[in-house]
Image: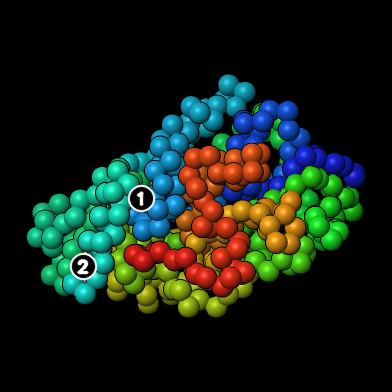
Amino acid sequence: MTTLNNSKFDIAIIGGGIIGSSIAYYLLQRSPGLSVCVIEPDSTYEFASAVRASGGCRVQFTCPENIEMSKYSIDFIRNFEQTMIANGRPAPVDWVEGGYLFVVPPENTANLERNVKIQRDHGCVVDLLTPAELKQRFPSIYADDLGAAAHTPHDGWCDPNGMLWGFRRRAVSLGATYIESSVISAKVDKVKAVAVQLADGSEVEADKFVNATGAWSGLIGDMFGMNVPVSPMRRFEHYFTAGTPVEKLPYVKDVARMAFRSEGNGFSGGLVDSNEQRGFNFEVDHDYFERVVWPAVAHRFPAFEAAKCHRTWSGLYEVNELDGNPIIGAWTQGLPNLYTVTGFSGHGMMHAPAAGRGIAELMLTGRYETIDLSRFGYDRVLRNEPYAETGIL
Ligand SMILES: Cc1cc2nc3c(=O)[nH]c(=O)nc-3n(C[C@H](O)[C@H](O)[C@H](O)COP(=O)(O)OP(=O)(O)OC[C@H]3O[C@@H](n4cnc5c(N)ncnc54)[C@H](O)[C@@H]3O)c2cc1C
């Protein structure tokens, strides 16, 4: 970690969380001579979303970009420990191929079937199950009120903290400079971003800037005069045990946004409240599990009737209020050398590898070479044209 006086870089990445660190890695891996700095105020990452995430990675999306990003990222995460060796040190991320399971009521069955077809068309392995087949596969589930389920056995979860540090250490080994301070303002001229001022009093100039500050990206956008419609939304995660023996469960999700998976001898997850008031709120509501999560979990898996919550923590989703999908690309109509990678709305950990690779392609060559992420560009925000997922979020 370095503190510098005024300095100039080819590329300055604002935010050194999982997205910013992934971008630094992909830029330098592809273009070793580049000077890249990552401006990150907190190397403990106390409030960063990444280290509070539950680690889920899945191909069950409907936008082709998300499916392709997941396919690439999951493969990358599977090999992360070796690919990200930095100075001889492997980068374990504890990948567990535990699978994902989406369950839906009868009225959502046709939609689920449509979504599964899209995923299969992209080469994903997805088992569409009737309630009876579901019950056979996961005997502890209550399936009488369900219409269907989709099981993706090659999905899974990993350790987000290991992934963040794997990217960061590797980026540093390739030459990235991490500056321990926060951006407090930006200097722009009529056609480009010129510099950012830091809380330590220094200034960083660069040819190109990236806003990779997740839940804080709206604030950073404002500093450049760019409206980034991303809000912080608190979300609780709980570690709980069942009380009665239950088979190992995949990452189970339903239309009410209940989401949990096996973790060690217990389970990790929660129930996302999409109406949670936006803001930088980390306060923990210790009744939330009993009041909201437990009834949902115990309904779906009666063995959880005696479930016990051992720990609750909170973190921030970086919600793109337009459509819940990421904003990736340059602000072509404003400051074309300002790039934004944010708004993953709860999927940024799993998509960090693909998003990092994609933006590095765009910044270094002017176009996407692997997955075409143009539809996630900022232009749709300016046009106010949502491009949203149609399945379970
Ligand atoms: C409870 C919970 C569960 C989740 N589960 C999953 C999951 O299962 N799968 C999944 O894919 N995703 C999950 N997510 C979402 C995921 O954590 C985020 O999408 C992802 O971490 C976003 O990465 P990021 O780098 O953009 O943001 P962060 O990890 O938050 O990093 C942003 C960084 O910007 C820095 N920053 C802030 N202000 C400034 C400034 N002024 N100057 C410079 N730097 C600044 C911050 O210090 C921070 O380190 C979950 C999130 C939560 C909260």
Q: Is residue 291 visible?
A: yes
Q: What is the quadrant of residue 78 in the picture?
A: top left
**Ligand 1 closer than 8 Å to the CB at disc 2?**
no
Sort mark 2 into few (<14), some (14-19) or many (20+) by Cα contacts within 10 Å: some
Q: Residue at x 61, y 53 (%)?
A: 329
Q: Give the image location of residue 322, x and y in percent.
A: 53, 71
User: Residue at image x 67%, y 30%?
Assistant: 31
Amino acid on which disc 2 is placed = Thr
Dividing the picture into quadrants, the one containing residue 341 is bottom right
Mark 1 Cα within 10 Å, few/some/many (few <14, many 20+)? many
Residue 6, given in percent of the width and then of the height, sits at 90, 45
**Which residue is rendered at x = 68% and y = 69% of the image?**
227
Q: Secondary structure at mark 2?
A: helix
Q: Give coordinates of residue 281: x percent, y percent.
A: 60, 71
Q: Quadrant of the N terminus?
A: top right
Residue 223 position in % (x across, y down):
77, 64
Q: Secondary structure at mark 1?
A: loop
Contact between marks 2 and 1 (CB within 8 A): the answer is: no
- The number of callouts visible is 2
Nearest the camera: 301 or 229? 229
Q: Is residue 55 left or right of residue 341?
A: left
- Write the residue at 48% across / 27% down: 82
Q: Is residue 234 visible?
A: no
Task: Specify the label residue 351 is tagged with.
Answer: none
Q: Which residue is mark 2?
A: 109
Of label 2 and label 1, which has the lower sequence position? 1
For residue 353, above or below residue 142 = above
Residue type beneath disc 1: Val
Q: Nearer the viewer, residue 122 or 26?
A: 122
Give the quadrant of the C terminus.
bottom left
In the rendering, which numbered label is found on residue 59? Answer: 1
